[in-house]
Image (tube, rainbow, N blue to C red):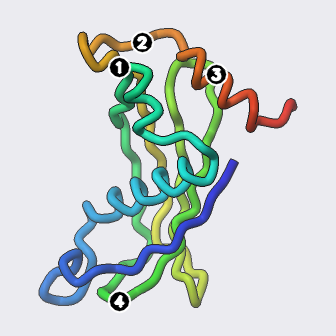
Amino acid sequence: MTHETEVTVRFNEADPLGIVWHGHYLRYFEDGREAFGKKYGISYLDFFHQGLAVPVVSVQCDYKKPLRYGNTVIVETTYEPVAAAKLHFSYKMFESISRDVVAVGSTVQVFVDVKTFGLQYVMPSFFESWRNRWMKPE
């Protein structure tokens, strides 16, 4: 399951040389996750209403080409199903005009009880139902 979302580099994300600070790429990943959730009908609020938070516990990003103020990029966000009670997304960012790849990466999120902050070792049933609805059998 993949979704593409367009992001335009904002002025406050660039340094005095006009180059995007590396940490903002992770924000673009999050923009991609939120747009993915809107497309596929699963948002952070859905988790919260189930008493769960889904914090990011692992991030990986390989920078291929610098972004500059005013660039428009496409963030391709792909849900990678895993058997464990985790959310795994991969990302590919590319310039919207040249289609040059500017970054690739991934994130891992876990399910945490919002009251106890306890890690959930079993996939929540509402999420499993959502996943079964969208995933094609292999």
Q: Amino acid at mark 4?
A: Gly
Mark pair 3, 2: CA separation: 13 Å
Residue under numbered circle 2? 120
Instruction: Give me the C-alpha separation between circle 3 and circle 1.
Output: 16 Å
Q: Nearer the viewer, mark 3 or mark 2?
A: 3
On the picture, is 34 further left or further right than 23? right
Amino acid type at circle 3 is: Glu
Q: Which residue is mark 1?
A: 112
- On-image quarter of the C terminus: top right
* Kind of residue indicated by mark 1: Val
Residue ID for mark 4: 70
Which sits earlier in the primary sequence, circle 1 or circle 2? 1
The answer to whether 125 is drawn above or below residue 27 in the figure is: above
Expressed as whole percent of the image width and height from the top left, the position of residue 28 reads 39, 63
Residue type at mark 2: give it: Gln
Q: Which residue is mark 3?
A: 128
Which residue: 66% across, 54% down? 2
Task: Kindly indicate whether the residue at mark 2 contacts the one at mark 1 (C-beta within 8 angstroms).
Answer: yes
Task: Please give the label number shown on residue 35.
Answer: none
Q: Are marks 3 and 2 in contact (CB under 8 Å)?
A: no
- In what element is the residue under mark 3? helix
What is the crowding at mark 4: few (fewer than 14 residues within 10 Å), some, or many (at least 20)?
few
Q: Residues within 10 Å of mark 1 (few under 14, many from 20)?
A: some
Give coordinates of residue 135: x percent, y percent. Answer: 76, 35
Q: CA distance from mark 4 to mark 3?
A: 39 Å
